[in-house]
Image: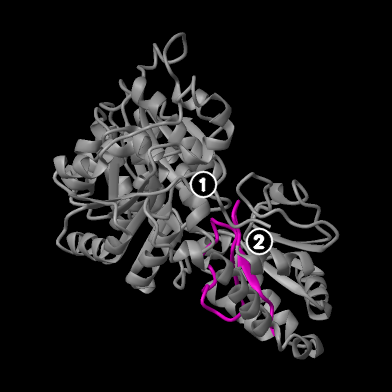
Amino acid sequence: MQVTQAIAEILKQEGVKFIIGYPVNPIIEAAAIADIRTIIVRQERVGLHMADAVSRLSSGDDIGVFVMQHGPGAENAFGGVAQAYSESVPLLVIPAGYQRRLAHYYPNFNSTLNMQHVTKSAEPVTMGKALPEVMRRAFWQLRNGRGGPVLVEVPLDVFREDVGDFNYVPSYKARSTPDPESVNEVAAVLASAERPVIYAGQGVHYAKAWDALKTLAETWQIPVTTSLEGKSAFPEDHPLALGSGGRAIPKPVHEFLQDADVILGIGCSFALTAFGVQMPKGKTIIHATLDAKDLNKDVPAQHVLLGDAKLTLESLNTALEGHPKDAVVARADVPAQIAAIKADWLETWMPKLTSNAAPISPYRVIWELKQRVDPENTVITHDAGSPRDQLSPFWESTRPLSYIGWGKTTQLGYGLGLAMGAKLARPEALCINVWGDAAIGFTGMDFETAVRERIPILSILFNNFSMAIELPIMQVATEKYRSTDISGHYADMAKAFGGYGERITDPDEITAAIERGIAATERGQPALLEFITEQELAISTF
């Protein structure tokens, strides 16, 4: 068996459902022959974003795979790999490489060397018979420990080599639990806390720890907030839900974190970024994470729990059973406090959320969209900048993995690929990306991929003919330097590609347009709704 066919066989044994790629790479053809669905994109970065979502929507059980050609294909893919690395997403990247005699000298791009700092591991296949062990190591890294992209580079002259005695044993997942003494110590701290708050990250998703998190919150009457990556780990219509925080946050998140005496971070890194909630100082921090390198890196922690989020929460729930619940009784009015703060906050935003002005308020579109979808059967994501900050505080996610949040390196155009990958993973769901006219300039051509590959997503586009988030920076140079003024008729673009496209300028047409767009996706047609919006700069911060 040649290397190409052996790779396809290994991917099948590992349960891979989709190969996303950009020609030329012989793995694409081999996968198609092996009955693995192949999806060809218009650019490498979008394909990696799609693979990213495939992994996320299955909590890493189904591994997203992207393959590309050597040289320029691998070079173009770098940004997408870096994005997955910053968001700790497990995906397999298999670039072709230059022939072994050419792979290590200028100017040839060597993926193994150049991507080792944006991958969890990067290894070349140096000979055909080494393939099974290289792939075994790759999938073990993908299924265990902190998530991240894993790269296997296949030189062009290795593809045709014989593997020899082919014998492959598929990988599996191993989980670790924290030190029992540390669990007991943390249980005592939580049981005696007066105003604890839980901060949940995406580790809750990968561990499928949703029920254990809910049990802890409800049993001990502890309010819960999440990172953007962890959003939907706790139902946001729950009386103890504070909402999710990024650069923009709901008021309950700010109020309860500021007032907390103990903050339990579970399945999170506490990484300091411009797009995450900053932990207030002077709090007792309990940091529960899978990766020791996160501990005491950005936020000093007085107590640590190292292990799988589900096992950690289950152990903590058990350890708490013997503690008196005096503090729980004292916190009986927490749901009422949350509801009051949320109502007050929403009241201040209601003029924007229900605005009838034209150009249309992006907040009005978000509010109407929220009313028109079934949250239990919807997966939504956003792009960088304004769409992220406008959507994330106001969108309530009620089902795990119904929101794909992100925000560390914030690549423009990320949301389109995420929505397409989500639709591959959850074909029964309405999959939505919300983006702006700057983001569509980066990846908009791949709306054609959605049409050609029959991936019926709903794209909500805010077109304000500018890079709105940059306006304050550029105002002083408006007369001489019009760099943030951009334009385009993107609904026509969608129609030219064979999708459903509609441009909406009248706020009274928002609801009907959304319904028409959803109906198009139900017919199997990707839809792009282009809303002509005002240059909105206000976001929910405190």
On screen, residue 339 above or below 14? below
Please, which residue is most extreme toward the top here?
A: 106
Residue 196's x, y, as percent?
Answer: 75, 73
The C terminus lies in which quarter of the figure? bottom right
In the picture, measured across the screen, residue 254 lies left or right of residue 375, that is: right
Task: Determine crowd level at label 1: few under 14, some 14-19, many 20+ residues with C-alpha closer than 10 A.
Answer: many
In the picture, measured across the screen, residue 335 lies left or right of residue 399, that is: right
Identified by mark 2, the residue type is Gly
Residue at numbered disc 2: 307
> Which of the pair 365/75 is nearer the observer?
365
Residue at numbered disc 1: 141
Q: Which residues are magenta?
A: 220-249
Please tell me whether mark 1 sits on a helix, a strand or a loop: helix
Identified by mark 1, the residue type is Gln
Residue 34's x, y, as percent?
Answer: 19, 46
Q: Quadrant of residue 493?
A: top left
How far apart marks 2 and 1 lie (CA) works out to 16 Å
Task: Determine crowd level at label 2: few under 14, some 14-19, many 20+ residues with C-alpha closer than 10 A.
Answer: many
Q: Earlier in the sequence, mark 2 or mark 1?
A: 1
Q: Quadrant of residue 281?
A: bottom right
Marks 2 and 1 in Cβ contact (< 8 Å): no
Q: Quadrant of residue 257?
A: bottom right
